[in-house]
Image (cartoon, rainbow, N blue to C red):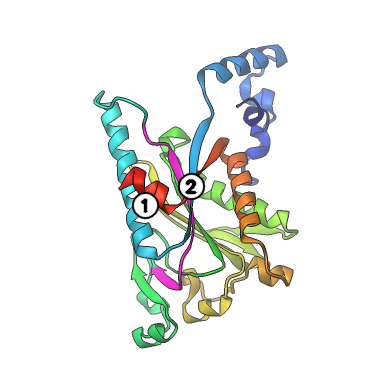
Amino acid sequence: MLLSLLLLGENTPRNSKKKNFFELISPQGETFALAKLILIEIVMPQKTIELYDLGHAAYQPIWDLQKSVQQRLIDEKRAEQKGEFKGKRLDDLLFFVEHPHIYTLGKSGREEHMLRSVMELQQLEAEFLKIDRGGDITYHGPGQIVGYPILDLDRHFTDVHKYLRFLEEIMIRVCADYGFEAHQIDGATGVWVNNEKICAMGIRCSRWVTMHGFALNVNTDLRYFNNIVPCGIDDKAVTSLQKLSGKEIDLEEVKERVVFHFQEIFGVTITPKGSLQEVEQIIL
């Protein structure tokens, strides 16, 4: 917790006005700030997110799993607020997964942004599914790191726009680790390198509990994006870390960088917990 507070100014997204640590705590100087810091260390334990790497998994079962986790977090929170919950509530969770070829259409998407017929999708061994996240159409497939943070934002901050900017900042820093300058585009959620999209994002939030998340193109076969209008944006292309670097990238290494920067930006501790089987035993 001490380290997270000292780095608070650096963890603010790049489009926010930064202040140094002592300005954030108090204008009265270092001695007061240190005393306040000690108090915060005692009464505010570090928030924890449990990480489950689900490996390769079909979309529908993981979508169902997300909904179960989200509903449990909501139910436990509401019961606690009513004084009816005893014991330890479920921690926030983060899932990593690689899906087989699938196109998902968000609630605000347009079906005409799918450019292939059902028969053509069968020939591509790809699925098409309408889902409950925000945003338009996107592609998931092998070589792509999909992350599903299921967070109770009441534990962090109740601001969905800030949450999305934090996710974008994580991906910008991951790209920087590989030597690429990524950026945001006003009015378009996601992360871009040279005006080509490298990470798509779409979430659903109910009673301040999130689900769905981000899809980072690492070693993704970008030809599959030719079958859609990605995210409903027809004047920009997509890219991947592999395309930018000219070589295949270690997916596990990228996951480690995502976790590192997630902890850095959100001021949390992420604890690896296991695989799909372990989380199913807890939730289902």
Coordinates of residue 51 in the picture (x, y in percent): 50, 45
Coordinates of residue 29 in the picture (x, y in percent): 70, 15
Whether residue 26 appears in this view of the structure is yes
Above-or-below relation of 139 to 97: below
Q: The disc labelled 1 sits on which kind of residue?
A: Gln
Q: Secondary structure at mark 1?
A: helix
**Label 1 belongs to which residue?**
66
- State the mark number for residue 274: 2
- State the mark number for residue 11: none
Whether residue 168 is in magenta: the answer is no
Above-or-below relation of 110 to 283: below
Could you tell me which residue is drawn at 30 percent across and 48 percent down? Answer: 284
Q: Nearer the viewer, mark 1 or mark 2?
A: 2
* Farthest-out residue, right: 179
Q: Which residues are magenta?
A: 89-104
Q: Nearer the viewer, residue 213 or 10?
A: 213
Q: The disc labelled 2 sits on which kind of residue?
A: Gly
Image quadrant where residue 86 sits: top left
